[in-house]
Image: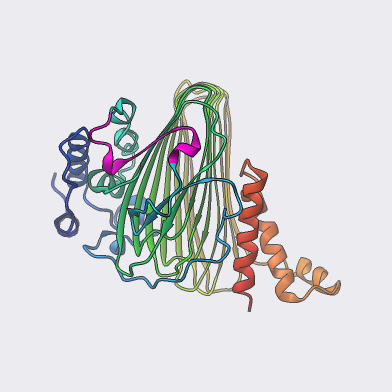
Amino acid sequence: MGLPQAKLTATEARLAALAMPVQSGWTRPLREAALARVQQMGLPGRRDEYWRFTRSDELNSAAPVPAGVRPPAENATFEELDRVRIVFVDGVFDPEASDDPAQAGLEISRLAEAEGQDLSWAVDLYGTLEARGQTPVPRPLAALNTAFATDGVLIRATGRVGKPVNLVYRHCDETSDAILHHVIRVESGADLTVLETGPAAARFNKVMEVDVADGGAFHHVRSQGRDHDRRAATHIFARLGEESIFKSFTLTMNGALTRNEVVIELTGDEGVAHVAGACMGDGAFHHDDTVFITHDAVNCESRQVFKKVLRKGATGVFQGKILVKEGAQKTDGYQISQSLLLDEEANFLAKPELEIYADDVACSHGSTSGAIDEDALFYLRSRGVPKAEAQDMMVLSFLAEAIEEIESEAVRDEVSASLAAWLERHRR
């Protein structure tokens, strides 16, 4: 059965505006397979089940909507941490602004320069987890990325890495349209932390594929911002082995349209997967977290903790699913999504789901939405705290459960400081 005409037209227009990188090496057949997936699925639309709450037009269009550029923040998130920076400006690697990757003590290569290198581990992964993540829910923007990504990093950790790798994204061109694809392999017993910061481009499409071997640990923290006009669609596809750990936290402040998708497979016994997010937005702000976690092994744990603070017409979306396959006994799955609406104009749309085919599990999900607790606000004000500061204190307290999912205390402090600074800038 062919695609509906509207979807076919949008897909053809988007593909016509793109050119596959001129490469004759190992990525070529993988890119062509991804292109075939896009052509078969078509780009997303409002008739698609998991796009009912989020308009995809501006992510599908042949050219991005121009986005104003702000000067770099004076105290950007993670600036005080000892880290190895890999900098991309509007999706183009900037060697002069980047640190020497050798400082990290692991294998780092650029996707744009990987064709002639012996990277058998990357050959086995590029596009593989993305393709697996297309079932049962199609994710065509991720397949589009695999086909047309112009650059990215290929990282392989074989031991405990002392410094985090910080992928820094800078936005300088009001019409930039960046497509980056990262592939990460954490070998058995290895431990890696990856940080991401910056607005990246006027429109940003990013895929990160993460394969964590038995006993490995991957920690991921990103801060999305800070240009308010930007549009972004990001995807994380992760596969976890036995006794492995995957933890990801996302802080989002500003942005006209942001959709973050996370797809995780727990394939080894006693794996742990935590995904969390804190978002704050006002005005023309639409933020969508869509998460799909599959338990396909025994005695695994997953947590989804998402908090959104919205006002002045901002919209927040959460779609989260826990799928427990037959035989995945002793599963511990937890999911919570909550929003704090600071006025009557803000909106929160939630679709929590559980699908369970095992009988010895402990799974729960919940979603709530509410306003500031007036009694608690009165309590603070009666003790001399100004109203605006009291409200900020309550907002930070509301977001604390999500922030606590960050493993590193130093990184938690950086995230909390960024939130406090955002609140102070937007205080009315």
User: Would you say residue 113 sits in the magenta stretch?
Assistant: yes
In terms of image quadrants, where is residue 65?
bottom left
Whole-percent x, y for residue 9 in the image:
15, 59
Q: Is the N terminus in the top left, top right, bottom left or bottom right quadrant?
A: top left
In terms of image quadrants, where is residue 6?
bottom left
When the figure is inspected, residue 64 is found, relative to residue 38, above or below; the finding is below
Q: Is residue 370 left or right of residue 218?
A: right
Whole-percent x, y for residue 177 in the image:
29, 60
Q: Is residue 382 left or right of residue 403?
A: right
Residues rendered magenta in the picture: 101-117
Whole-percent x, y for residue 270 in the image:
55, 23
Q: Is the C terminus in the top left, top right, bottom left or bottom right quadrant?
A: bottom right
When the figure is inspected, residue 178 is found, relative to residue 343, above or below; the finding is above
Towards the viewer: 17 or 297: 17
Residue lying at 17% horizontally and 39% vertically, measured from the top left: 32
Towards the viewer: 388 or 123: 123
Q: Is residue 390 left or right of residue 112?
A: right
Towards the viewer: 216 or 262: 216
Q: How many marks?
A: 0
